[in-house]
Amino acid sequence: AQSVSQHNHHVILSEAASLELGCNYSYGGTVNLFWYVQYPGQHLQLLLKYFSGDPLVKGIKGFEAEFIKSKFSFNLRKPSVQWSDTAEYFCAGGNSGGYQKVTFGIGTKLQVIP
Amino acid sequence: ETGVTQSPTHLIKTRGQQVTLRCSSQSGHNTVSWYQQALGQGPQFIFQYYREEENGRGNFPPRFSGLQFPNYSSELNVNALELDDSALYLCASSLQTGGGYEQYFGPGTRLTVT
């Protein structure tokens, strides 16, 4: 079955701390992977995506993620978080080709303390 | 802003009633997907429409149905509403190509069933 799991449901960090949010997926075949962010009161926005090629993907606002096929992981990282990064982060995945069913993880609420 | 709009923003219905939610896709996008996001959960895939045909469905009963129009706008219809249908309903549009895809989400419609 296709699934995406996120390990941390609620993370609290101080400003300037480093961030790593875990995500594991269970998919057969070629997979497309995404990280979305939902700021308070705003809609879901795409942070970054992996389709193929370089497994280290850079996204907006200084975020990056690394696709490790052997570990079925796609962890999100940022070297130094800011208060404005307070949001909910969703890892998501889907099979490439065919119809675009995207499976989301449960989400991680990140709170950054000034 | 993604260019994907949804209406209405909020809706309150009574159990057993029917509801129609609307979505306007981003210009040029030929695929629309609908998701249900219950409180504290990630979005769950309901179904997807491509060129006015349903081409994928998640684990939702037939009382969840949809339409896509020639201008690629879309409707989600839910019959015989149940209390558990209370959720945020998200529409996402994308352009289906031979490679990967990106889904752009609207702000959602908050449905409350009493």
Image: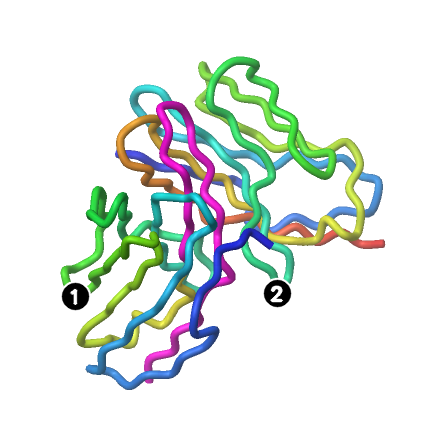
Does residue B72 appear anywhere in the picture? yes
| Inter-mark Cα distance, 1 to 2 | 29 Å
- Residue A39 placement: quadrant: bottom right
Number of dots carrying numbers: 2
Q: In the rendering, at what x and y percent does residue B105 appear?
A: 48, 52
Q: Chain of mark 2?
A: A
Which secondary structure, mark 2? Answer: loop
Q: Residue furthest left?
A: B62
Q: Compared to B80, does A29 lie above or below?
A: above
Residue under numbered circle 2: A41
Mark 1 neighbour density, 10 Å: few (under 14) some (14–19) many (20 or more): few
Q: Nearer the viewer, residue B88 or B98?
A: B98
The numbered dot on residue B79 is none
Give the residue at x 28% y 47%. B48
Question: In the rendered structure, the residue with mark 1 lies on which chain?
Answer: B
Q: Which residues are magenta?
A: B90-114
Residue A70 on the magenta segment: no
Residue that appears at 53% across and 21% down: A67
